[in-house]
Structures are given as C-alpha cells and as structure tokens.
Image (spheres, coloured by chain):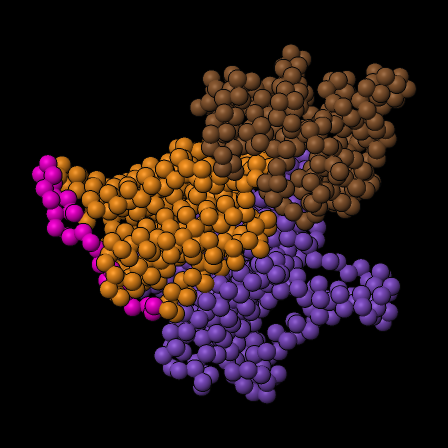
Chain colours: A brown, B orange, C purple
Amino acid sequence: MAALLELEEVRAGYGQTSVLHGVSMSVEEGQIVSLLGANGAGKTTTLRSITGGVRWTGDIRYSGRSLKRLSTEDVVRCGIAHVPEGRGILTELTVDENLRLGSHLRKDGSDVRKDYDRVFEYFPVLRDRRRLSASTLSGGEQQMLAVARALLMRPRLMLLDEPSLGLAPIVVRAIFEIIRTINQADGVAIFLVEQNARLALEISSHAYVLEVGRVAVSGASSELMGKESVRRSYLGY
Amino acid sequence: MQEFIQLLVSGLANGGIFASLALALVLIYNAMGLVNFAQGEMAMFATFIAFTLIGRGFNYWIAFPLTLVIAFAGGVLIERVVIRPVERAPVLTLVIVTLGLATLVNGTAGFLFGYEPRVFPSPFSVRTVNIIGAFVSYRDLGVIATSAVVLVLIYVLLQRTTLGLTMRAAAHHPEASRLLGVRVSWMLALGWGLASAVGALSGIMVAPVLVLEPNLMQTIIIYAFAAAVLGGIESPLGAVVGGLIVGVTVNLAGAYIPFVGGDLQLAVALAIIVGVLVIKPNGLFGRASVRNV
Amino acid sequence: MRRLRSLPPRYWLVLVVVLFFVGLPTVVPSFQSSEWAQVLIFAIVIMGLNILVGFSGQISLGHGALMALGAYTSAILIHRYHMDYLVTIPIAGLLTGAVGFLLGIPALRLSALYLALATFALAVVTPSLIKRPADLTGGVRGILIAAPDPPQFAKDAFGAVTGGSAMTSDQWLYYVSLMIAILLFWFAWNLVRNRPGRAMRAIRDREVAAAASGINIAGYKTLAFGISAFYAGIAGALYGLTSGFVSPDSFPLALSFQLLVGTVIGGLASIAGPLIGGTFTFWLPIVSSQFVGSQPWIPTQIASTFKDAGPAVTYGALLILIMIFAPNGIAGLLASGYAYLRRRLLGAADRKSGHMPPDPQTV
C-alpha cells in the first residue's frame, strides 16, 4: 500500500545553491515521523518542497499523486497543512480571522463548529483573545494559534516546522501533548521537523536524520533513541 | 453662517467623490504596494459606459449598478492582462506601467467616445432644500447618500464576509495565505476589480457636476491622492475620512482665502499632499512602518 | 595608428553620431533644424532625469515643471531685464538646479512611490501656479522671445560650408543646443563613470549596504536631484528660445510624463538612452498622428479622432509592452542584441574587448 507522503530522490535549493542532494522519505497514514538534523541540514527546505515554496526535482507523491507543478495553494487544498518556521501568523488580522482562514475551505458546517469547540478546549487562551489582533499574542500563544488553525483545516497530513522554537518548556510540553492527541484522536499524520531531538523521538514512531542535504540515518524512533552511537553523532546527547 | 453650511454640505459631497476614488487607490496599494496612477482614467471610462447605457434607454438606477459590475470585470481583466506579467517587478516599472495604462485608457476613451464634452444626467434634481436657513441642493445630498451606501457595502464585504477576509489576507500576507489555501493571485485580480468599481462610483457621481470628457478625472485624482495620503495610504477608513476633510477644506479655502480663489484649489490639494508627506508621512490612520536608511 | 584601431567600437559610434548632428543643418531645411533642436533639448532633460531615476533610483514625474522654471527664468530675464540670451541659459540652469537640490531634501523622506505622487501633483499644479503672478509671467498669454541673430563668425562659417546660404536664427539656436548637449553629455558621462556614479548605483541597488559602507546617502540623492534639475533648467531655457515663447500651457502634466517615458524607453542607466529617448519623445506624437492621416484606406472620421487619440493609445500601449518585454528600454535591447551577435560571431575573441554590459535596472 502506498504511503500517504513519499519523497523520492528529491533535490532542492535556492538559486544557485543546492540544499537537498537527493533525499527519499515517506510518511504513512496516521503516522508521526520526525525529521532531525543540525541547522542548515535541509529540514525546512524539505517541508518547503512539499508545499511548493521552493523548486525541486525528483518526485513527491501525496496519496499516490505527484505534487510536481502544483502551486502552494493547490497542494494545501489536497489536505496538507503546513505550519511554517515563524508560524505564519497573519498579524494584520484578529485571532478569530486567523482561525477562520483555517476553516474557510471546508463545507461541513456542523463539523466545523465542533472543531472550533475542540480547538478552544485545547487552547482556551484563543477563545479569550478572539477579537484581538493576532499581533498581541505571545510566542507560545501564536504557536497555539498556528496549530489550532492547522487543525481547523482538517488535514490528513500536517507539516510542523520547529514548533518548540523559542518557547518555554512548559508551553512546549503542552503543545506536544496536543499534537499527540490530534494524531491519536483524528488520525492525522504528522511530519515533524525539530531541533529538540529527544522530544521529537519520544512522540514519533519513525525518524530521519538529515546531514548536509542527505539522509544520514533513518529508522524507528525507539531504536534511534536506544543506539548511543547515533545519539552522540547525530542528536547531540 | 448659511454660506458656511452650504459650503460644508457641498464640501462633504465633493468629499464623498474624493473618498471613493481614494478608497480605490488604497485598495490597490494594500494589495500590491502600488499607487495606481490609472485609477482616475479607469473611472472616467466606466462613466462613459454608464453614459452610453443611459443613452440607450436604461434607467439611471439600473445603469448605475450595471456599470459598477462592468467596471469590476474591467478591473479584473486589466489586472490579469497588464499587471500580472509585471507583478514582481520593481516599483518604477509598475509606476510606468500604470502611467502607460492611464494614457492608453484616456486615448481609448477619446477614440471611442470623442472629445466633445457631454452632459451627464443626474437622478437628483438641482433644486435646493432649506436646512437651518441654508439652501442645500438635493444633488449634494444625493451624492452623499449614494456614496455612503456604496462605501458601507464595501466595508461589509471586506470586513464581514469570507471573501473579504481572504482578500485582506492575500493583500497583507501573501505567502502565509498561500499556505492556507488562498488563491492569492486571484485575490489580487479581485482587488483590482473592486477598486475599479469603487472608482467608477466616483466618476459617475462627479460627472453631472463637471462635464463628461476624457480629461474628467485628471483633477479629481489629485484630490483623491491628497485624501489617501492624508488618511494614510494603507487605511480604507483613512481614505474616507481624508476624502471628507479634503472636500470640505478645499471648498472653504476657495471661498474664504482670497489668494486661492477658484483656480488654485488644486494647489491646496498639493499643499496637503506635501504637508502630510513632510510632517507625518503615514497620515492620520496609517501605521508607522520602518523606513530603512 | 595602433591606438586608434584599438578604440572600442563605441567611440567610433559616438563620433559618427556627433558628425551627423553637426552636419545636419547644412543639408535640411531650417525648420527641421528647429525640430531636431527640440530632440536635443529633450535629450538634455532626459540625461538629467536618467541620473536621477536610472542611477540614483528616485522617481520624478515633475521634470516638466522644472523645465518651466528654467524657461520662465530665461524668458523673464530677457524680457524684463534685457539680459543677453546666452547668459540667461546657465543662470536658468543654476537657479533650477538649486531649487531641485532643495526639493531633494524632503524627497529623502519619501519612498519611491510617494515621491512619484508628490512630483505628479507638482506637475499638475504648475500651469495654474504660473498663471497666477501674471505681471511677472505674462499670465495666460505668456512671454514672447525675439529670435536672436546669429553672430558674425557663425554666419561666416555656415556660409563657407554650405556655399553661401545665410544662417537662420533657428540653425544658430540648433548649434547652441548641440554644443550644450555635447558638453552636458560629457559631464554626465564622467559623473557616471566615476565615484559619484558608482555611489549612486550602490544606493539604487542596496541602500542599506551602501549606507553601511559609508556612502553619504542623503548627499548623493539630493545631489542627483539638483543635477537633474540643472539639466532640466538649461533645457527649459533652450526650449523657450527655440520655440520663441513660453506659456503656461507649454508645460502640462503630459510633458513630465513624456519625459519619464522617454527616459525609460531610451534605456535607464544607459549612455545612449537619452538620445534615443529624446528622439522618441519628440517624434512619436507627430509620426503617429500623421501616419494614420496619410493612409488612404482609413475613413476620415476614424482618422481624425485617431489623430487626437492615437498618440495616447500608441504611447500607452507601447509603454506597457516595453515594460513587460524590455524593461531595460531600447538601449538595453540594442545592447543585448549587440552582445548576442558578438557572442555568435566572435566567440572567444570577445573576452578582450572590455565591453560593458548594460546595468540591470533594479530601482
């Protein structure tokens, strides 16, 4: 059975500089997969390739269908939510308007309302600040907003780029709990880029480690955590 | 006192006209960071279309909204054909393209409709009504009312509908919006359509006061620039408020400041533009943006 | 002999062009000299505008107004104060240049777009502003300028070259314009090739980086404004002289617009651009209105409205097309075409020529 997301020999870069030199990975339906590696290894570029933010060669398939030549909007409309580095919050708009942009493509009215209830249950602060400009939120709150908004899109696959970046540990724990819940309750597959390798390995079932644009190591997260050589060389602990 | 009220009301009416055109400028500025120098000419062209429709027997109150729809379509078309190829070009290129567009539209109007001045009908009579002792014309009141209705509709569209939301999102945050499935490029086209329709309103309102000919909007656009700059080029609310202030100020200046008289009112608009840009470039409602170096 | 042959082809081209212009009045009727003088006058303004827009990256839609300032300065000095017309030219230039420099100061605070807006408004208001102080400017009627008699040495030289023809005032003014144009061209060329030019280009391309490397941004930008105004002022004075009069309607918004168009179509930040631009600015309206009228298969009604509307339609459409397909203007196109041909025909020998590619426009 084909995986939900498949990358095959993907090369990508910016202008003259090549960042990915032929990476192959896959994410199964309902699976959490982490993508680890040092700064500059190409993790963000990988996510960007999937949603068409950077030029790539090779093949990327979603539900068996190639994403080549699709615009970002069209890729997203297939059911992929991407929370980018920096969170992509529309600061000119209110919290509520940001959320509405998450759900604006959906036709199932009553389910949307249910999802809003769930989102506010996970992140009560968002309900409190609904009418305020999104720019008034703190870093952690913006991350919550970004995840909530992605949730409202009812995706089958969620791409998360460094959700822990710049956040206090307690906030990070909360967010990762919710990520786990989303995955277990709704079966949303998650492709998680993280610098915090330990957290990522704890939550994911499978992991890839990128080094200078290539897959250096891959395997079950539990195995990678167990192998001391892998931890030392690639994960820094 | 009566004269003051009369000037105030007619100033507000003029202000409504300036506000509409200024709003068109602000919509496009928000969408692309560009001042559309062709906005006035596009409005003039739409006004000619309205004139033609009325000439063919359409009732004014049917021709009017019909023209707005046609203007909307025209705006979308222009964005797709003329602007799209240069969407990412530097500012100077875009300025020249809109200037070229202005010339092209003006020349096309001259070619299709000729240069003789026409009288544009107004549904409002020129009779006056007595308000607190001042004689205010129905026409001015009609302009104020019509402008207000259309501007409120635009507000509702932008602020209360999903379409308006996606348009605003695409204008301010194109990349992030794409990641939410918003078709940013089409939103830009719709923005142009909407701006074109709002501009057409301005033309139709002013045509009965002046004469309809291809150079109709060339002074109006200056007042609209002044209104947009005064209100803050990014703020739709600012455009409306700015328009009203400019309308009233120019009227009062023309009447009470002898140096200005009738023919230097345009210079008042220039003075407003220069004054605002020197003292507070962001205008009344604009946000202070970081200007490098 | 060796040195002559190793001069790049560009120098030969310049020489040919200069010779062409010097010889022109000797072979064409006098009124055509006057027309070509106007081409040169536009080229002068465009040289200045080129420095402002193409090299220092600031937009001006108000150079028609600056031309008006120069023209009226010269006209008033001649008419009211009976100054020698030749003396009024540099005075007009310097005065306009100073005004331009002063305008450049608030311009620093404006982004490119706002500056375009402000100068646009200035250009629109200028005719009204001129009409106001009627006793100074002659109001709506303007000021008439008597055609100056050519000096004796010029008459003799002209007569000698053309076998006895008497030099007209138009032809003399043509040569005055030509000499000034050559002088100003040489000045601009030097400016651009040396430090000021490089500094301006640095500012245009990456203002933040330029500031970081110690370039005085404010200084160069206002300098660019002042220089371009100087050129416009001189051109304005010449314009008044060659037309024989100045009036508020000689300097409408359309003029400012046509000047910017000529600058861009000629080719921004290029050396040949201004001349191409000047030619374009002068000839297009005439050609497009005459062309349609002379075609027998177009019915007269259409032809007569096209005569009024045609130039605008052609201008507008051409401008848009050029911006889409050739943003570096005609000079840019020619230079690319030339470079392409060289590569095809000469291949490796190209490396030694030192041919400079056109500056990419990144305003």
Query: Quick one: quadrant of the N terminus of chain C?
Result: bottom right
Residue at 69 percent of width and 45 percent of height = A65
Residue at 25 percent of width and 61 percent of height = B58
Q: Is residue B116 magenta?
A: yes
Residue at 68 percent of width and 66 percent of height = C334
Quarter-of-image position of residue A45: top right
Q: Is residue C226 magenta?
A: no
Q: Is residue B149 left or right of C184 when viewed as pictured?
A: left
**C139 or C146: which is nearer to us?**
C139
- Looking at the picture, how far across and down is residue C33, in whole percent? 52, 76
**C290 or A185: which is nearer to us?**
A185
- Looking at the picture, how far across and down is residue B198, in whole percent? 36, 48
- Looking at the picture, how far across and down is residue B25, in whole percent? 42, 46
Q: Is residue B270 visible to us here?
A: no
Q: Is residue C115 left or right of B139 when viewed as pictured?
A: right
- Looking at the picture, how far across and down is residue B165, in whole percent? 46, 37
Residue farthest right in this picture: A229
Q: Is residue B83 visible to us here?
A: yes
Residue at 72 percent of width and 20 percent of height = A203
Q: Which residues are magenta?
A: B113-138
Q: Is residue C285 above or below residue B23?
A: below
